[in-house]
Image (cartoon, helix red, strand yellow):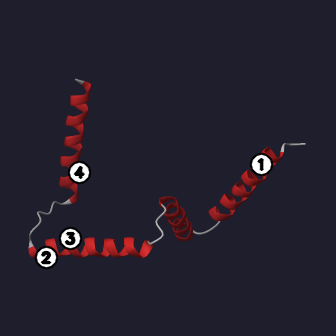
Amino acid sequence: MLPRGLLSYTIDMATRAQLVEALLAFPAPERAEAARELLESLDGNDAPADVEAAWHEEIARRVQEIETGTVDLEDGPSAMIRLRERARQRLERRRS
């Protein structure tokens, strides 16, 4: 017979495995929502509405910067070239 703690751990692990298996049967959008909720629970963030509001403010600020021309925009391919070059330079500095 297994010790009580080990038995509890074994049952918990089986339950988790069953839960994961059940969750994986859901469509991707529902799995993503479940994953988001689980991650939020790890952050200890009990106020997702506050986070949502903060993101809306940030988005509004960025849109305003774009519309007023107070920010320089860069297309995706150019940004990737610039970032890859920066990463290459950092890697070279670390190697030398």
Which element type, helix, strand or loop, lies under badge 3? helix
Type of amino acid under label 4? Met
N-terminal of the pair, mark 2 or mark 4, is 2
Image quadrant for the N terminus?
Answer: top right
Verify CB contact (< 8 Å) between mark 2 and mark 4.
no
Please give the label number shown on residue 80.
4
Q: Label 3, label 4: how many angstroms apart (C-alpha)?
A: 20 Å
Verify CB contact (< 8 Å) between mark 3 and mark 2.
no
Q: Nearer the viewer, mark 2 or mark 4?
A: 2
Residue positioned 70% across, 55% down in the render: 17
Label 3 crowd (10 A; few <14 / some 14-19 / many >=20): some
N-terminal of the pair, mark 3 or mark 4, is 3
Type of amino acid under label 1? Thr
Q: Label 4, label 1: how many angstroms apart (C-alpha)?
A: 48 Å
Give the percent coordinates (x, y) of residue 94.
25, 29
N-terminal of the pair, mark 2 or mark 1, is 1
Judged from this view, the residue extending furthest toward the right is: 1
Label 2 crowd (10 A; few <14 / some 14-19 / many >=20): few
Query: Which residue is under mark 1?
Result: 10
Which element type, helix, strand or loop, lies under badge 2? helix
Type of amino acid under label 2? Glu
